[in-house]
Image: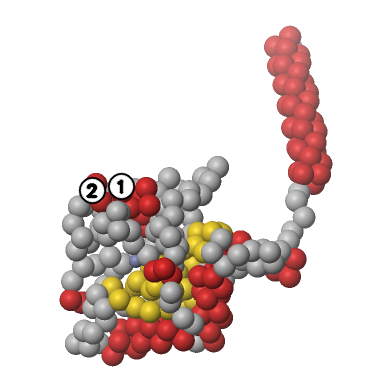
Amino acid sequence: MKKLIFVSVILMLFSSCKDTSKQKVKNSSDIKTVEKQEEKPKKITEKEKVFRTFENLADTTFVRLADFSDGFAFDMRYATKNNFLKEKVYDCAECYTRVKTVKALLAANEEFKKSGVKIKFYDCYRPNSVQYKMWAIIPNPQYVANPKKGSIHNKGGAVDITLVSLDGEELDMGTDFDYFGKRAYLDNFDLPKEILANRKLLKETMEKHGFWSTRTEWWHYNLQGSHKDKIANFKWNCN
Ligand SMILES: [Zn+2]
């Protein structure tokens, strides 16, 4: 009998302890829910997104492309080790270029969208100091422009691009970015029809919007007249 009473008392104590802890958990989760509701930020709809305008901006001013549109894709290879240098030469991945280059890119991208594709960037403006970094790794003008002379990337007029579907899937251009060889040449027509058609779409649309191509790199486009701009060493903020 004594034993039975003892067991009952223990059970009662145990169950009351359990109840208290349950109550505590319930209370704390209630508080959390209230806090979450208070912190919840307002959702911004597509229409409410505000992009920069070109008002009061000179054509040669350096700007961040993504501040003007969210219609582009990016894979800034020199901010990673996934490039022909096998070194990361940018502190962070950003696509900056001059206002006039941005204007032409926006117009070209609008046209690409009609074909269900958009521009994806591998490289944009490249500060001259980064050109020196690249030259130190591979001091060969066949692959890297001499930083003393500078590249049109250093002038804010060149972009390295490809085309992706609106869902981000890359179109087949025959080689990866920065493949140095005949397969990357624009005058190499000994390639499957699909690759030639993709390159043609890229080249014809870019040319229509003021860019010219280079024979040996299907991804590289220069804005007309940008070779006259000064070599720049403007550096974007990574914070
Ligand atoms: Zn290039």
Q: Is residue 176 left or right of residue 95?
A: left
**Residue 107 appears at what percent x and percent y?**
55, 79
- What number of labels is visible? 2
Q: Which residue is mark 2?
A: 137
Q: Which residue is mark 1?
A: 133
**Residue 126 appears at what percent x and percent y?**
40, 56
The residue drawn where x is 77% and y is 33% is 28
| Quarter of the image that includes the N terminus | top right
* Residue furthest top in the image: 2
What amino acid type should be assigned to the residue bearing mark 2? Ile
For label 1, count other residues whose C-alpha is less than 10 Å away and answer few (under 14), some (14-19) or many (20+): some
What amino acid type should be assigned to the residue bearing mark 1? Lys
Whether residue 26 is visible, yes or no, is no
In this rendered view, identify the residue nearer to me: 171 or 49: 49
Query: Mark 2 and mark 1 in contact (Cβ < 8 Å)?
Result: yes
In the image, residue 52 sits, relative to residue 199, either above or below, namely: above
In the image, residue 30 sits, relative to residue 114, either above or below, namely: above
The quadrant of the rendered image in which ligand 1 is seen is bottom left
Whether residue 215 is visible, yes or no, is yes
Q: Is residue 207 left or right of residue 42?
A: left
In the image, residue 196 sits, relative to residue 178, either above or below, namely: below
The residue drawn where x is 41% and y is 87% is 204
